[in-house]
Image (tube, helix red, strand yellow):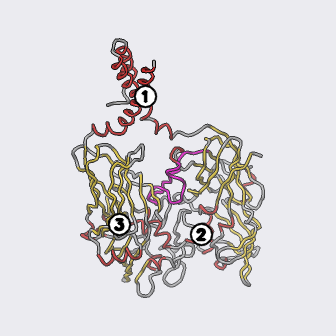
Amino acid sequence: MNLHGPPASIFAFEVETMTRSSPVTKYILLIAAMVLVFGHFSCDADNDAETSGESIRFQTGVVGSPDAAAFTNDKGWAVELSKAEMVVGPIYFYSSTPLARLFKRLFSPRLAYACPAHAQYDKGTVLGEVLKQYVVDLLDDGVTFTGASDGQKGRCRMFELHIHPPGEIEAGSAEGEFERLSGFSIHVEGEAAKDDAIAPFEGYLTIPDEGTMRVVENIGADMELKDGSTAVVRVLAEAWFANVDFDSLVEQNEQGRYEITENTQAYNAWLTGVRSRYSYEAYTEPLK
Amino acid sequence: MKHATTFFALALVLAASLTQSACTSEDEDAAGKGDLLFYAGGGKALQEGFPHTEGNTEYSFVDGWSLQFTKYIVAFGNIELTDPDSGKVKGSFDDAVVLDLKAGDGADLEIASITGMSAVRYDVGFDVPIVDGGATNLNADAEIVTKMIEDGYSYWIEGYASKDGRTVEFSLRLSVATHYSECVNGKDQTTGVAIENNKSIGAYIYAHSLHLFWDTLASGDEDLRFDAWAAVAGEDDYLTEEDLANQDLTDLRDENGDPLLDKDGGAVFYNDGGVLPPDQLNLLAFVEYAARYGVHFNGVGLCVTESLD
């Protein structure tokens, strides 16, 4: 029985027949007609349920963490950051899964298509996006606004950050702001202390352009994107340094600061921290 | 008028009922019936070890190791065929089997059959569970299976790797119970599998063992490495999963305690794709994650993967 055939012509025939039939026949034909009509809609219902919601326009921004200025990391170093700046963008906010199936596949780091070397996260619908790159001072208490986004209303359960060097993506910040980063994606400066050791340090980082390393994917979120709200990404710079052992730094610059150079534990741990989905979070706030 | 209302209401109920049944069964019944036979295997990696060649690609360790498996014991179970639209289970194999994919020179083994299925397309899902006493042992060492049950493992993998006259034996026991669903069919890139009328269709769960040795959990630029494994084997050159936990991914060391370098003198870097928690940045956590994602359907068809822990 083909329920997706041309019901209109069949229905027309049956209505005409009904006018000349007995009452019982009429009702049988009525049932048959209803089966056709109900069937036409009900068999497509699941597909329709996966379409996304209404169009919205919301603001976006990036802010640092209140704990970034001073913290103690997992290696026992008391760290004070005096500079922490990064270039960030694009940013994509995802539903994580088609909206009708949220309960079946709620966001979880455990949910991804199998095969990490060909990682295919189940991102769902793009609810909003930041398409340019911006310079963000992570020690500034205020939110750096990263533009308005047209998108779809819905619950964002996952987002991803792209961390490219300045110039690889269209600039959202004023051109002059990028100069502070000297061509790198991230610049940090500070002092770390442990026992009797004190290590003033400085680091510049550009994530290696290998595979998708410059994209931090699969970051968990749980926020409602709607008209008039601001979606804010918080960068937890203290988490970047969670596993950094400053003892591994040996090269000093002219200012006497230890440089976080490649092939050191500090560099690998910092890079891993910057790439970690646990170093970022997101929330919404009313439009200011 | 009362009769008319009653008949109309009856008509509505019947229409809804008939519509429901028509959508869920008539198309399927008209399509006929067929069977699905499930196999499991590990392909050339288990049969030939590393290096080996598939098509025009040679799979070899960039740091010069060769490797052979001697045991690759894993459990499969809870195989389900579900309606792609409703998710309703239409056929299942509810038991679990435990088998050694290396035994018999790594030939594929039949693990389950689901018969009398309507000849339509289904989504495919299955588990790699922790082995329990209810699992049927198809061909694995009984003593090892007993240990897997006692200690709660889903994998028991043994083998040896060699380089420059040194041989490292390894025994890897992993507790990574995982559910796989909505599998893409690696043969034609469709989702699931289509049953054909009056036929037995074969389907294949592929243990993609090379995942264990890749240096990335993210996309692209993956290399197979064993130096980081061998470095923590200890003086007896016998490596277990407990040893892997001693290799810090932020501070990879060779067997002498020096920074682990690649053949060009650069620091070896394992890219965790940002997925490992900061307190689990060690090689065991990396390999456990990789193992979960190293199971495919009908070739390298990918599945949605969810931990059962």
Q: Nearer the viewer, mark 2 or mark 1?
A: 1
Residue B151, x across and y down, in percent: 41, 76
User: Does residue A87 appear to the left or right of B188 in the view shown?
Assistant: right
Chain identifier of the residue bearing label 1 in the image: B
Check residue A125 for magenta coloring. yes
Query: Which label's residue is closer to the chain start, 3 or 2?
Result: 3
Write down the residue under mark 1: B12
Q: As shown in the figure, which amino acid type bears the numbered disc 3?
A: Ala
Q: Please state which of residues A137 and A160 is positioned toward the viewer in this rendering.
A: A160
Chain identifier of the residue bearing label 3 in the image: B
Check residue A58 for magenta coloring. no
Residue B251, x across and y down, in percent: 56, 76
Write down the residue under mark 2: B278
Q: Please state which of residues B182 and B132 is positioned toward the viewer in this rendering.
A: B132
Pointer 3 local density, CA inside 10 Å: few below 14, some 14–19, many at least 20:
many
Q: As shown in the figure, which amino acid type bears the numbered disc 2?
A: Pro
Q: Secondary structure at mark 1?
A: helix
Query: Which label's residue is closer to the chain start, 2 or 1?
Result: 1
Label 2, label 1: how far apart the Cα atoms are: 59 Å
Q: Secondary structure at mark 2?
A: helix
Pointer 1 local density, CA inside 10 Å: few below 14, some 14–19, many at least 20:
some
- Residue B75: give its label: 3
